[in-house]
Image (cartoon, rainbow, N blue to C red):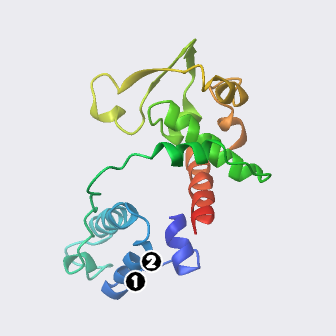
């Protein structure tokens, strides 16, 4: 929703405006971001079709066309080759110094995620259990698809401990939930700081 709002530069969008040309333009806007065209346009397609089911009847067609009958949601492009960071790149991130608090937070959140086996921002924010030296949580992204609720225990490596301790929370493992209203807000901040720095 935030991405779409930035693209249209307003807070409302009628179904009539969402035609093939509009979707094609939005897809082009999203193209620099690897997964966004597939993920965001897939969500919009789902919302659009759900609205058609809810609003249209046999006799009245509130939404009288479906642009997704001609517009295909872009497939996610798979990276070929190695996706791992080089040691040099990792050290560059680790040693990066800045006076900007938000940029520093982005770097630290990345290092925490990297050191905790790719722990997502939503899980960094919501995890509540730390049994030293293990963080224990259910991975939000896959919890609904697994019988064990995607339960995982991750050991906090001693080299990560100073960073881990810096961001300790009172009721959750990390203090991020005390500073941000929702996982989406926290994730959005991290994502857009990264965009700004890499542009």
Q: Residue at x 31, y 62 (%)?
A: 46
Q: Position of residue 43 (x, y in %)?
A: 36, 61
Kindly identify which residue carries mark 1: 25
The residue at the far right in this view is: 99
Kindly identify which residue carries mark 2: 29
Q: How many numbered badges does the structure rendering display?
A: 2
Q: Dot 2, crowdedness within 10 Å: few (<14), some or many (≥20)? A: some
Q: Nearer the viewer, residue 99 or 35?
A: 99
Q: Position of residue 84 (x, y in %)?
A: 39, 46
Q: Residue at x 19, y 74 (%)?
A: 58
Q: Residue at x 67, y 23 (%)?
A: 171
Q: Dot 1, crowdedness within 10 Å: few (<14), some or many (≥20)? A: few
Residue 53, placed above or below residue 68 = above
Residue 168 makes an appearance in the image: no
Q: Nearer the viewer, residue 137 or 34?
A: 34
Q: Position of residue 169 (x, y in %)?
A: 69, 27
Residue 77 makes an appearance in the image: yes
Q: Secondary structure at mark 1?
A: helix
Q: Position of residue 27 (x, y in %)?
A: 37, 76
Residue 84 relative to residue 52: left or right: right
Residue 129, placed above or below residue 11 = above
Residue 7 relative to residue 20: left or right: right
Q: Which mark is residue 112?
A: none
| Quarter that holds the C terminus | bottom right
Whether tag 1 and tag 2 are in contact, CB under 8 A, the answer is yes
Q: Toward which corner of the image does residue 178 lie, by quadrant?
A: top right
Q: Toward which corner of the image does residue 65 lie, by quadrant?
A: bottom left
Q: Nearer the viewer, residue 189 or 4?
A: 189
């Amino acid at each position: 929703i935030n991405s779409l709002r930035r693209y249209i530069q307003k807070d409302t969008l009628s179904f009539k405006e969402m035609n093939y040309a509009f979707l094609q333009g939005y897809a082009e806007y999203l193209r620099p971001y690897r997964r966004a065209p597939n993920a965001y346009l897939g969500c919009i397609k789902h919302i659009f079709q759900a609205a058609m089911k809810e609003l249209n009847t046999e006799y009245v067609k509130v939404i009288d066309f479906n642009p997704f009958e001609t517009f295909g949601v872009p497939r996610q492009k798979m990276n070929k080759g190695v996706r791992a960071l080089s040691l040099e790149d990792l050290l560059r991130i680790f040693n990066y110094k800045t006076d900007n608090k938000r940029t520093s937070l982005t770097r630290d959140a990345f290092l925490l995620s990297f050191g905790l086996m790719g722990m997502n921002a939503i899980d960094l924010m919501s995890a509540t259990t730390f049994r030293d030296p293990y963080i224990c949580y259910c991975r939000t992204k896959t919890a609904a698809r697994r019988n064990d609720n995607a339960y995982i225990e991750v050991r906090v490596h001693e080299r990560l401990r100073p960073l881990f301790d810096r961001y300790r929370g009172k009721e959750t493992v990390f203090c991020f939930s005390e500073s941000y209203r929702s996982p989406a807000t926290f994730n959005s901040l991290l994502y857009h700081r990264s965009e700004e720095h890499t542009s």
